[in-house]
Amino acid sequence: MSPAQNSNPHPPVDVDVDAIVVGAGFAGLYAVYRLREMGLSHRGFEQGSGVGGTWYWNRYPGAGSDSESWVYSYTFSEELEQDWTWSSRFPPQPEILRYLEHVAERFDLARAFTFDTRVTAARYDETRNRWEVETASGEKVTATWLITAVGCLSSAAVPDIPGRDDFAGPWYHTGEWPHQGVDFTGKRVGVIGTGSSGIQAIPVIARQAAHLTVFQRTPNFSVPARNRALAPQEVDELKRNIKEIREFCRWSTIGQPYDFQDRNALDLDPGELRERLEAMWQKGGFEWMFGGFPDMLYDERANDIAAEFVREKIRETVKDPAVAEKLIPKDYPIATKRLPLDNGYFETYNRDNVTLVDLRETPIERIVGAGVRTTEKTHELDMLVFATGFDALTGPLLRLGIRGRGGRKLEDKWAEGPRTYLGVATEGFPNLFMVTGPGSPSVLGNMPTSIEQHVDWICELIAHMRACGAARAEPTTDAEASWGAHVQELAAETLFPQADSWYLGANIPGKPRVFLPYIGGFGTYRKLCNEVAEKGYEGFALG
Ligand code: NA7
């Protein structure tokens, strides 16, 4: 154990530290590790009772990562990378949580955090150049730097359907799942929502419940995950090559161990294209799309080839043609809503105990004691699952009650949509650094890869500030405005704005329609961040 690991005994209440970290998931744990390496005093707050972040909360049946396990992890410790062995291609939630618990224990990170503690306010005191953070339990801690590591998809959205509280049985949101689990045996279960969470959960719930009714508002495309156990020889080979694999991820478009081809779908002979789509479909995973052809995300004709391919697969898989047609997305380009990976999702509709309710044909009128009443009838249910998503990217930040210079509220500044520089900082809020904030690649890439890059970059900026004696860093209005325009321009060149997705805030009533992540590619983004740093943190006012 290094001396730095012992240098941060849990400070008493109402103290001052160098940095406060909010959140103990992938991002918060790594931030604490880096701060400690730098010899900075720090304090972490976490709403959950333990580490894990996303993987602490999302314990619904079937939950797991859609990134290949061997890259869904940290790279900062070679020993950790070599010691830890994943069981399967796509790790299930319990295993990821075990991994994060192992990391916290191995590097003694948990003691930096106060658990079961929600941050309720974070105010910047201009005269003292300090962030004052207040928690729900009344504790106050001040710091020079405030690092938010609150995740992108951590603010659960339960829709305000009339009568929600009248439901006689228990209901759950996938993102706030009970730790003791839920037993669906013998129950009539309803699932509202067919995004990634619903698509992961539905096949598993269907196998357990007496009857499952799926309430679908928008049909979703989905690609088979083809998850499988990793054989020992494969693990050995991955570990042998892990350095090269990780280096590839660092510069790739979505931080994964594959990248787009350097040719377009429309340049290929249709037969060859079909063969390639079929081969990749058999392989499974995101690679089907994101190891494919770039024009599929830019050109409607190319996108439609991919979409039509999946539509045919749905028709082949689902035995009842009427059900298949309801499951087929027809009014937005494929992958412009987050593309789910599935383990037998469409096959689930061939089961006798599963009913699909198309809410476009028969919308929900209200929830009643006995179940969900649509314009057609009351679907009687014992349990209800909301797989209805999150207030993505901005939601987790806005609920921290952040106020910057002059008492300005972050929610006021972002009333028309988030404004950031590189997705990491925002003008008027000095020394506030957001890990994978809006305007960074975040959810468009492999999260641990994004997180490590962001935390490293933030820590290097802090080191730079200390080296040059700067007390404050915040973006200039110009740098922020041009970054914001760049993020929107890049998105406008793609097909993404055509879908009502959470990337655009379209899932939250009243949320401004602004494309939230940076879509220029993770490798390009890393290069830009490096250039900003090399130019003395160009775009930041250091004071
Ligand atoms: P998503 O992808 O936002 O999916 C939410 C689903 O819930 C989606 O099918 C929505 O339909 C549906 N929804 C939301 N509100 C309602 C109401 N009021 N009535 C009916 N249906 C509704 O969330 P997930 O949790 O699945 O995935 C989030 C991300 O977490 C995922 O992409 C991964 O990155 C991890 P809609 O499409 O809006 O019509």
Image: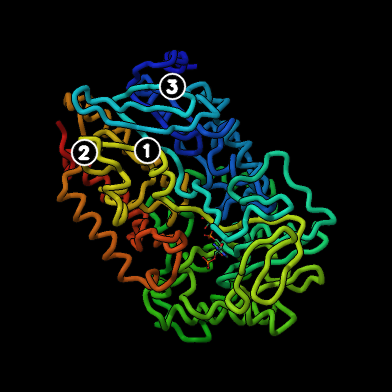
Left or right side of 467 for 115:
right
Image quarter of the C terminus: top left
Q: Is residue 125 above or below residue 167?
A: above
Which quadrant would residue 318 be assigned to in this image?
Answer: bottom right
Q: Does the residue labelled 3 lie within 8 Å of ligand 1?
A: no
* Pointers 2 and 1 in contact (C-beta within 8 Å): no
Secondary structure under tag 1 reads loop
C-alpha separation, residue under disc 1 versus residue under disc 3? 15 Å
Q: For the residue marked with disc 2, what is the amino acid?
A: Glu
Secondary structure under tag 3 reads loop
Residue 139: give its label.
Answer: 3
Residue 401: give its label.
Answer: 1
Query: Within 10 angstroms of label 1, few (less than 14), some, or many (20 or more) residues?
Result: some
Secondary structure under tag 2 reads strand
The picture quadrant for ligand 1 comes to: bottom right
The one of 242 and 47 positioned closer to us in this rendering: 47
Q: Where is residue 508 in the image (x, y as percent from the top left)?
A: 45, 59
* First reached walking from the N terminus: tag 2 or tag 1: 1
Query: Within 10 angstroms of label 3, few (less than 14), some, or many (20 or more) residues?
Result: some
Left or right side of 15 for 232:
right
Q: Position of residue 299 (x, y in %)?
A: 38, 78
Query: Within 10 angstroms of label 2, few (less than 14), some, or many (20 or more) residues?
Result: many
Residue 474: give its label.
Answer: 2
Q: Position of residue 431 (x, y in %)?
A: 26, 33
Q: Where is residue 397 in the image (x, y as percent from the top left)?
A: 39, 43
C-alpha separation, residue under disc 3 versus residue under disc 2? 27 Å
